[in-house]
Amino acid sequence: MGKSAQKIVILTGAGISAESGLGTFRDEGGLWAQHRIEDVATPEGFARDPGLVHGFYNARRAQAAGAQPNAAHQALARLQAEHPGEVVIVTQNVDGLHEAGGASRVLHMHGTLAGALCAACGHRWVAPMEMHPGQPCPACAAPQGRPDVVWFGEMPYFMEEIYAHLAAADLFAAIGTSGEVYPAAAFVDEAHLAGAHTVELNLEPSATASRFSERRFGPASETVPAWVAELLRSPQAAKSPP
Ligand code: APR
């Protein structure tokens, strides 16, 4: 029996959903060029103006509902289905396109647009398309419903599980992320410590590009299917390019 099949851990960011029509954050004209982070993606901003924050997420929820997964989402689902080893997808994205593309195991470390959370009792439920200030919690009735999205200054979800996956990774890939936001931007370092081969698949070099063993540039809908096809042909192909 040869080496057991490679464990693959994949981190995705807004770039993987760009070709599905969802805006990224830091590209030209991105979401953070249209809105101030402190107004729409912090607990303080929500306390100050919940209507503005609900409006921001209602618009993104509506946009995400109309978006389709692209070839990159579908390729990662194929990898999960056909690779003999474990393939874990950790996403910073709050859209549901990985699941819509057929992925089975997705850890949403920044939460999801589809989720609602009660700030009073912690109850979670499926968010309505539109949420409003004073949104009542179905469990405790407090008017404290909010998007179940992790804001700046809040603790991302699944961190313990994510670090355990990184510590056991043979191959780590970061796809469509600028490497500007921690802790996700340091996952490549954890993977290196575990002895994993690391590859960045991005439209252009990210802030952490130099920390990867391998880099492949281009639109995700092209680079990800090609990378997955190579992996499935010969798992060792994941090593550095010829
Ligand atoms: N294919 C591949 N990569 C792309 C594409 C594409 N078609 N289009 C854009 N990109 C790349 C950009 O080059 C950029 O490096 O995707 C990256 C998007 O970076 P950001 O907009 O910063 O998004 P992300 O890295 O996911 O942001 C991380 O920051 O604001 C918070 O919580 C928010 O989850 C988000 C986190």
Image (cartoon, rainbow, N blue to C red):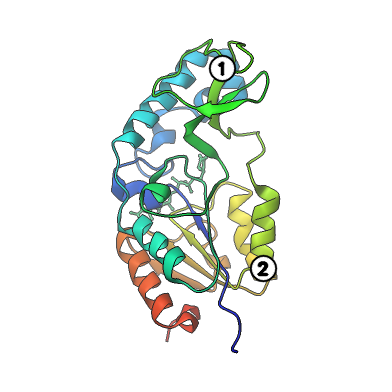
The residue to which callout 2 is attached is 168
Q: Judge whether 224 appears above or below 48 on screen.
A: below
The residue to which callout 1 is attached is 138
Asked if disc 1 is less than 8 Å from ligand 1, the answer is no
**Residue placed most toward the observer, 149 or 33:** 149
Q: Judge whether 89 appears above or below 100 on screen.
A: below
Asked if disc 2 is less than 8 Å from ligand 1, the answer is no
**Residue placed most toward the observer, 113 or 187:** 113
The quadrant of the image that shows the N terminus is: bottom right
Of labels 1 and 2, earlier in sequence is 1
**Residue placed most toward the observer, 183 or 149:** 149
Q: Judge whether 221 appears above or below 51 on screen.
A: below
- Residue 34 % position (x, y): 39, 30
Q: Secondary structure at mark 2?
A: loop
Q: Amino acid at mark 1?
A: Pro
Image point (58%, 66%), residue name? 211
Name the disc covering residue 225, or none: none
